């Protein structure tokens, strides 16, 4: 896999954008008419949710390519995307709970959007655990790719759950339903999380690839056998 | 009751702090593991 510095640049740029968007959202964006200051959680919650779906879609694509074409690089990217997806799914649940408490009066509710998101977290977390338990790298690559293809069914369910079922969670906002005053901090943070994620997934994939190289390297020759060969 | 939520800054701050801690923590974890694996590979060569 590559050795270029672009992932470090992407991570740095992502952090700068998130700092900028968050400062704008916390200090300069106006209060929302009904939710007041609590709505400011949107500037971190929504970009995290968008990027969670994006990185899990990338994991799905890596799983398909890994199954159809093979190659350790795609398995490494798959591992990286699953791990980042699990971290972001966990974060989106925490942010959502912190928004739910002052607006709904509860930390958690088993409504369709929250339940399908929890399934996402535990489903992909389970696949990550599965990879730790399988010693054979070939079986690990195939089994986890198949599991990702199956688990990915939950991603469209998360997205459409608010439309298909009676949910406490609001339906997706569009530029027409959100005031223009809220657009910029939301977009800046969305691109910030995207750049951060892109850099981290690439670095994590390089790490997984290095581990695979070590795993697949032939074992060192025993000293006696090495001596025989040199004679 | 007006239906408008008053206050709530503690939840906002908690959400931003949780986001910063988790995202920065994950970034540091990836950097650290990547550096360690590269050093291990370079030492083995």
Image: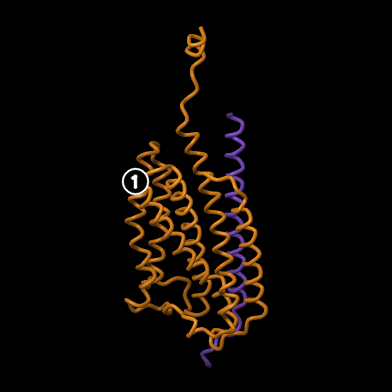
- The vertical placement of A109 against B42, above or below, is below
Q: Which chain is purple?
A: B
Q: Chain of mark 1?
A: A
Q: Which chain is orange?
A: A
* Residue pointed to by mark 1: A143
Q: What residue is shown at x 56% (from left), y 64% (from top)?
A: A193
Q: Position of residue A191 (x, y in %)?
A: 56, 67
For label 1, the SS is: helix
Q: Residues within 10 Å of mark 1 (few under 14, many from 20)?
A: some
Q: Which residue shows up at 58% across the image and 29% down it?
A: B44
Q: Vertical placement of A191 versus A141: above or below?
A: below
Percent coordinates x, y for residue A203 in the rendering: 56, 49
Q: Between B28 and A178, which is closer to the camera in this rendering?
A: A178
Task: Determine whether, in the image, residue A90 is placed left or right of residue A28.
Answer: left
The residue located at (41%, 63%) in the rendering is A118
Residue shown at 41% from the left, 52% from the top: A62
Looking at the image, which is closer to me, B6 or A161? A161
Q: How many marks?
A: 1
């Amino acid at each position: 896999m590559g050795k270029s510095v672009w992932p470090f640049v992407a991570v740095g740029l992502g952090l700068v954008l998130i700092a900028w968007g968050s400062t704008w959202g916390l200090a300069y964006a106006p209060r929302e008419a009904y939710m007041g200051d609590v709505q400011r959680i949107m500037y971190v919650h929504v970009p995290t949710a968008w990027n969670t779906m994006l990185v899990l879609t990338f994991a799905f694509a890596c799983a398909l390519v890994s199954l159809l074409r093979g190659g350790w690089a795609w398995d490494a990217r798959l591992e990286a995307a699953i791990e980042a997806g699990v971290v972001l799914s966990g974060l989106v649940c925490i942010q959502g709970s912190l928004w739910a408490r002052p607006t709904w009066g509860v930390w958690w509710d088993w409504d369709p959007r929250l339940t399908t998101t929890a399934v996402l977290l535990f489903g992909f977390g389970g696949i990550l655990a599965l990879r730790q338990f399988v010693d054979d790298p070939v079986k690990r690559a195939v089994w986890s790719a198949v599991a990702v293809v199956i688990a990915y069914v939950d991603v469209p369910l998360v997205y459409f759950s608010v439309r298909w079922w009676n949910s406490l969670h609001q339906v997706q906002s569009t530029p027409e339903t959100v005031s223009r005053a809220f657009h910029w901090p939301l977009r800046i943070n969305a691109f910030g999380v995207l750049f951060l994620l892109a850099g981290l997934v690439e670095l994590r994939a390089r790490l997984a690839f290095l581990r695979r190289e070590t795993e697949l390297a032939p074992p060192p020759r025993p000293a006696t056998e090495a001596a025989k060969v040199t004679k | 009751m007006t239906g408008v939520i008053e206050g709530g800054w503690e939840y906002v701050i908690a959400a931003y702090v949780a986001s910063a801690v988790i995202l920065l923590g994950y970034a540091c974890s990836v950097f650290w593991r990547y550096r360690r694996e590269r050093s291990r590979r370079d030492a083995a060569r």
